[in-house]
Structures are given as C-alpha cells and as structure tokens.
Amino acid sequence: MMLAVSCARFCSGLAAFRTAARVRPLHSVSGTTVAQIDEEVAKLLELKAQLGGDDGKTQFVLKTPKGTRDYNPKQMAIREKVFSTIVSCFKCHGAETIDTPVFELKETLTGKYGEDSKLIYDLKDQGGELLSLRYDLTVPFARYLAMNKITNIKRYHIAKVYRRDNPAMTRGRYREFYQCDFDIAGQYDAMIPDAECLKIVHEILSALELGDFRIKVNDRRILDGMFAVCGVPDDKFRTVCSTVDKLDKMSWENVRKEMVDEKGLSEEAADQIGVYVSMQGGMDLAERLLQDPKMSQSKQACAGLSDIKLLFSYLQLLQVTDKVVFDLSLARGLDYYTGVIFEAVLTQACMTPVSTDTQNGSEENVSVGSVAGGGRYDGLVGMFDPKGRKVPCVGVSIGIERIFSIMEQKAEASAEKIRTTEVQVMVVSAQKNLLEERLRLVTELWNAGIKAEMMYKKNPKLLNQLQHCEEAGIPLVAILGEQELKDGVVKLRVVATREEMDVSRADVISEVRRRTSEA
Amino acid sequence: MMLAVSCARFCSGLAAFRTAARVRPLHSVSGTTVAQIDEEVAKLLELKAQLGGDDGKTQFVLKTPKGTRDYNPKQMAIREKVFSTIVSCFKCHGAETIDTPVFELKETLTGKYGEDSKLIYDLKDQGGELLSLRYDLTVPFARYLAMNKITNIKRYHIAKVYRRDNPAMTRGRYREFYQCDFDIAGQYDAMIPDAECLKIVHEILSALELGDFRIKVNDRRILDGMFAVCGVPDDKFRTVCSTVDKLDKMSWENVRKEMVDEKGLSEEAADQIGVYVSMQGGMDLAERLLQDPKMSQSKQACAGLSDIKLLFSYLQLLQVTDKVVFDLSLARGLDYYTGVIFEAVLTQACMTPVSTDTQNGSEENVSVGSVAGGGRYDGLVGMFDPKGRKVPCVGVSIGIERIFSIMEQKAEASAEKIRTTEVQVMVVSAQKNLLEERLRLVTELWNAGIKAEMMYKKNPKLLNQLQHCEEAGIPLVAILGEQELKDGVVKLRVVATREEMDVSRADVISEVRRRTSEA
C-alpha cells in the first residue's frame, strides 16, 4: 500500500516480496518480522523521497499514514456485508444508534485507559481547545450519557477509533480501525443485560461463519479478590492485572517473570496467581471456587463468583453455553471495568496458508487474537457526572478489522466474484453517432429508478462496451443500433446466456424490471 | 450541547437564552452574533471550570469540542434516511465506493486548498509522520488514484471532513461534517460525465423533497478568460476569484471594495468584472458571450463557453435544464478546479421561523447556502503522480449537514413520530417470577430473526412494560402470565388497537411474522 515517487521499480520488487510474505504468514517470515521490515523500508523510502529524486525536483512519499489503509471497492463490498450482518443483529435486539465526534476534549480521555494512555493521538494546539482522537467508543459514550443526563439506553455505535500502537496490518492490527459497540446502560437486575451481550456475540460470530469460537468470561471482582488472597498489595492490582492480560500472547513463565522482575511481586504471590489463572470451566468451577478456602475469604471474589453462576443460568436459557467458558486468566487491559468481562476468540485457524509448503501443525499456533470483547463498567459515567451519579453499563465491542482480514482471505480463496456495483443494465450503441439516443434511454431508465450506466465516449466500440458488462457482472445490456431505432425497439441481451430479443421501446422499462427482479 | 460542572443553574439559563435565540434566528439576534456570544460564554465557562468549583474539587467542562456535535438516536434515524436516499442514487448511476483514512500525511494536503489551508487541523508531532485531518474527500481521492495507478473509476465516498472554520451550528455549519462525494475519473469525451454529475444533483435534491432549487453552472476557463479581458494581472486570478466567490454572501459593492482595496485591482477592471458577473442565463447566454467583442478575445473563455453549450445540450437530453442556470458570478473557492464548476442552492426558505413574531418578509433573505457543489479538476491527480500523468476528474459533493438541519426542522414541525428502533415485539410478563419464561420466549424470537426485546428486570410492572411499547412504537406485545403458561399459549396484543388474542406457543413465531409483515 506504500509507494515512493521515482522508485517504482524498487517498490514493485518490495511489493512482490510482501505478497510472498503474506501468503505464507505462518512460516519462516512471521507477521511481526514482516511488519518490522515494512517499517524500516518505509523509513528509508521516506528519507530517500525527502532528499529528492534524481532530477532534483521536490519529491514526496505517496502513501497513507503508518498503520492505516484505504479500502478499495472490493474491500468495501466485504465491509458493507459484515456491517450489515452486525447491524441486523444489534437491531434485532432493539438497539438505537448514536454518533459522536472523532475527537474529544483531551481531558475527557484523561485517566480512563491506564497504561494505554500513551497510545492516544493528540491534535496540535492551533489555538482553542486541546483535542485528542477517540481511543475507543466507550468513553465517548459515557461522556454522552453524563452530558445528556441519560440513565437508560441500549445503543450501538459503529465508528473508527485511533491508537498509536505498533501496527501488524497483515493480521488486521491497524492504527485506525473500526469498532462496533453495543452497550446497555441502566440500573437493572444483575446479569440480565450482561447475558444479552454474550448472546449478541454468539449470534454475530455464528452469522459471520468464521468457524468455531469460544467466549471467555471472568469478573474484575474475582480477579481483584484473587490478587488480594494471593498477597498482591492493593496499589498493584491494576498493574498486575495488565500483566495477566498478556497471557494470551505470552507464556506463563514470561508473565510470571514480568510480575516478579518488573512489577516487584513476591515469587509466592506470583505462583499462587499461577494456580488460579490456569483454571477454566463453567458454572461448576464458580461453585467450586466459592468453596475454595482461600478464594472464599474475599467478599469481592464471592460476589463475582455468585454472579458468574447467575450469568451461566441465564446463558442456558439463551442457549449459548456451548461456547462460553469461565476462564480465570482473562483480565482485559482497560481500567474502567468493574464486573463481568469477556472476550471471544476464534478457535479454528481461518487464516490458512495459501502456499503448499506448510510446516507440520504450525497452523495450530496461529491466532488472529480476540474478535470481540467487553464487560461491565459501572463507574465510568459517574466520572463525568458533576455529582458522581452512577449509570451502570455493560457492553461489547466487535473487533471488526480482524474479521475483515479473515473475510477478505476467504473471498480471495473462493472462486465467487464479488460485484462492486449493482448496475442492472448497460446502455450500449452498436454504431457511431448514437450518443444522444443512449443519453435518452439511460435517462428513461434512471428516471424509473433502474440502476443503469453507459460509457462516457461519443463512439465507444461495441466490444468494449460488452466487455465492461462481463467484467462488472452487469446482467443485462440494452443495445441501440440504427436498425433498432428504425424499428422502434431496443435489443435486450442477457449477458450470462448471450440470449438477445427485441423489445418495443415503450416496454423497455417493464421488461428490464421483470428480468432483474427474477434474478 | 455544552454543560459545565457545578454551574448547572447558570447553564440552564444560558440554554433558555440559546433556545430563544435559535427559534428566532432571523431577527434582532442574527446567527453570527449568537455564535459569537456562545463562543465567549464557552470560554468563560471553561475558565471557570478550570479554576475549580465552589467545593475546590477539580472540575472539567462536559461538552463536545467546538463546532462538533453528537447525533442522538432521532438525529441518526434522519441521517440514515438521508444517506440511504443519496446512496441509492449513487448506486443507480453505477458507482462503486471506497474509503480512506481520516488523516493524511500533512504534505499530501499541502498546496491544494489555497487561502483555506489555514483551516486544516494538524495532529500533534508525537514522533513519526506529520499528519493532518482530511479537509475534503477530493484530495484523498486524487492521492488514492495516483497511488494505485487507477485511470478509470466512478466512485462515491461518504465520510466526515474537518475544517477549523467559524462554526454556525444552528445553520448547519460545523467543524466536523459529512461530505457525500460522487466523482468520475477517466479520459472521456467532453461534458458527458460532467452532465451526469448535474443529473445526480438534480435527482438527489428532488428525492429529498427540500423544496425548489437551482443549480448554478460556470467554468473556471470562462472566469480566467473574463479576468484576462478585464485586465486582471495573471498572478491575481486566484485571489480575485476567491473574492468573486463571496458574492453569495456579500453585496457587489463590498466585493468590489475588497478587489480594489485589498487585492489591489484597478477600479476599471473591477467594474468590467461587475458587468459580467451579473449575467445569468442558459445556452443562449453562452452563445451571446461567444459573440461578445471582449470575451471572444480569450481562447480560454471561448473553450469554456463552447463546453457550456455542449453541456446544456446534454442536460436537455437528461431532462434537467429546468433547474440549471449558467451564472458568471459562480466562482468556488478551491484552487484545484480547471473546468466546469457548479453549485446547488435551495430557493425556497425551508428554515421558517417557529416563533410567531416574524418580521415582515425577512424569511426571503434566509439562505442555508449551497447544498451541493463540485466541478472538474483535471490537474489534481497529476500533482501526486511521479511522472505528472494526468487523470481528468469531475465530481460533486453533497453538503449533507445543511440538509440534515432542514430535515430535522421538518421532522420537529411534523406530527409524525420517528422510530429509533425496529423492534417488532416486546416480551412482557403479567405476574412476578416469570423472568425465565421471558428469557425462553425472547430467545426463540431472536433465534428466528425476529426483532424483540424485554425489560432487564426480574419483576417489571406490566404497566411499565406496556408504556415502553407505546413510547417506542413497538407494534406487538407478547404477554406471559401464569394462566397463559398453564394453557400453553402466549397472549399477543396489538398495541395500536389494544386487540388481544391467545396464540398457541408453537405458533407464536409464525403469528408474529404474519402480523409484522402485514404492517
């Protein structure tokens, strides 16, 4: 996606290298390494471009900013399909939608993201307010609720968010990316809205047909209780929690090392945490931990465990327990969670290598990471309210970019052609000097609401016009020629069958309608 | 939309003042003055908040950044309806869609916007590339074409753009606002794609039912030729053009003054320009100007005038000449236009005052400004191409925020209730302890793809549940009670008629489907 001026040859070599690296993402060249190489190459090209090309003219790099990309029409077709599936589900559950600005006052975001705050994009101070790009949709939602004194809402919000993170674009990790959030705000009875959020994740991941998945569930109160009974000092809960959050990317050994060496935890505390975070189960595990001599010492942990039991009882009624697992290693990085937390991961390697020289079994290690996550955050709205009035909230965010990556690869692998327009009929001319006649007919079609197009040339070749129909997947052609004009007809051609028939000019609209509604 | 912590009373007074000012935007308190007062008040409140409230706690202002707004669910419902009308039209004309990042490399935007460049939002230099928020969708489109070596495309792009302008939000002028762009790129025969752009503006403004409108057309070559024959020095073309562009907001006297006093033009030149820019007409005016002794001296002007004639001949075939007028005062501010330019204005005052103390005739002077604009820019892609290869382009941008403002006011004025969800059936309980039964039924409905909801309380009151249906416009209620459970039925209630019937549990899905597809 990057291209520097006056080094086209170098770049096309680079593109070939990249393409090769992308089709074998699982082998000797790992995703991270490719990303690192990309970054270095980008820096060098930028430098080269700034220095000016061989002709001494000012040169500049022709690219999108680091970690971002354009969507071409094919990618947009996939994106719109995914969005429409997700929005249908949100609407099925009765959600309204809102939108907020892409930037917020800097202070609105301050103190909400813990260690991740360094990844926030700030705007330049050009006079006036200090602004930052939104980091997620949750904090703007909380600000919206407090500002408008809303105490009850079920809303979805689909929009781009911004993080100055290290991008790994081949794996769907970008600096500008979409979030699809569904949240329920309001003072309700325990675990009912929480259970619906999990139902929604289940419905969306099933509908998108991404292969098998698991939804891990835990509770911040269980984590905090666990930290307390394992002897973690109160002021280290959040930082130790961030380390536990890395268990999906790092081995336990390395997580333990970070806890002890970097976070200054005692070895005993770390080892006791190690016992708990290896536990996975269902309602039974919650039951067992409620009897655990250590864990049951913590009131917080017990409250969390009782709620997990209640949650599972609702999940049974909602018919989603097959995919949900209570997992004590699930931590989630963000500071604002206060209760249930959850994360969905795909368990089938959807990103299968295209090349044939697969190393045995290496696919098993591939993970696109979590594709959805969320939890309960009862304190966030209160942080914005002048009187600290709380509005309990629970919500889920669908990690759409990773899903796009998978869908794109699926589309590339399949033989099915993706149409990027919806044109039903192309108006073409068989001879010269028929521009006016084409304009007349296409106007008739447009005025009747039929999706139609024609070539913007005075005298296009018939073959070129028909070829465009084949390439763009346009099902019908309306051919105008001298003979047809004389006879007062239009020749309709069905592209798929090459069948042709003369239709009287007065019947063209109804005939096109009839034939396109059939398809 | 702004609220400062611990000064709620002051603010509610302010809100009352604002509301009063908004309903009478045409009278003693003009739009600009209100905006200025708002700004001053905002500054003072921010200062007050930073100083801390009476209790000494740190305080902050709870608002969206200056010139931006949230969209609430009702506004979103209107927005989605408008977008869907516009997208339908773009698709009817066979357009694909693309998306680009919200920010670009700063240098990508440099030198494209002339005097407006000062309004670009820059991001803070946090290490790495220097970035700016996109100012329009045209420059990113040109960058996209050059980067991907695309020479032919018909695409639309709907996205937000950013300008650090003086907002006038009551009139739909924001710092963050949507643009809906349709562009045709490619080397084609003169005026054919240009005519389609005008057809699209005509279709969209007609479909949105915003009242009568005019589409003004001119050509940069006619303007430049006119400047040349009037004796404007070459290096002053662009800056004089910016002044002419103000004719829709300023009187000729003031425009003339700016030309002479600020831009240093001779009085004779200004007066000669004054003669031309008062001219309006159709194909006949182009014909006449081709015979004009002065104007016909300019090759550029003649080329532009011939193309205007050709354009009108195509517009006749496209059946849109009723709304199009050739207007020599139309200039458009942006630097990159090279040929035909156009702008659509609403000619009926849609923004009628709500209050009754209307001053006579003042409505006539109201204008929401242009609601669409565009033109031909044949040089922009070449500015990004390493070898300067040109890709001729023509396009149109729909000024959607002004249209939203009008639609919102129409919606407020009308009695019709806007639904913000699509829920078809609400599952309610008539007695206590029926949460599990409600969860079972709502799961069945969701699994069948029916839009359904229930209250997140264990034992909600029947009245509250029914009230929610009335308020949210939900057409059906599925009532569960002890008797119904015993009988193996669900009581279906039609909210509009209050008609109730028992439906056997096995038939609920099909009965709900039947009743909601009817509506």
Image (cartoon, coloured by chain):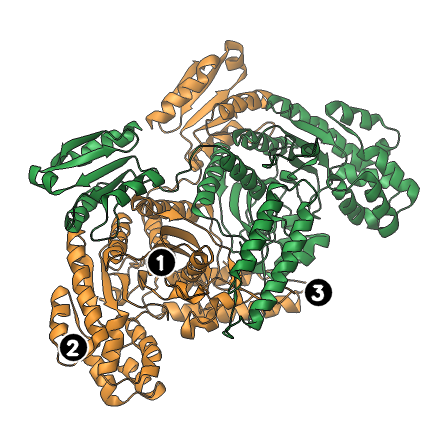
Chain colours: A orange, B green
Circles 2, 3 touching at the beta carbon (< 8 Å): no
Q: In the visual, does B404 lie left or right of A418?
A: right
Residue placed under numbered mark 2 in the picture: A296
Check the image and report above or below for A412 versus B303: below
Give the number of callouts: 3
Q: What element carries label 1?
A: loop
Res. A81 in view = yes
Front disc: 3 or 1: 1
Query: Which one is in front, B511 or B325?
Result: B511
Q: What residue type is labelled 1?
A: Gly
Front disc: 2 or 3: 2
Res. B389 in view = no
Query: In the rendered image, which quarter is residue A145 located in?
Result: bottom left
Q: Mark 3 lies on which chain?
A: A
Query: In the rendered image, which quarter is residue A455 located in?
Result: top right
Residue A324 placed where, x, y %?
20, 60
Q: What residue type is labelled 3?
A: Gly
Q: Residues within 10 Å of mark 2 (few under 14, many from 20)?
A: some
Q: Which chain carries label 2?
A: A
2 or 1: tag closer to the N-terminus: 2
Residue placed under numbered mark 1 in the picture: A399
Residue placed under numbered mark 3 in the picture: A56
Residue at position x 41%, y 18% from top?
A510
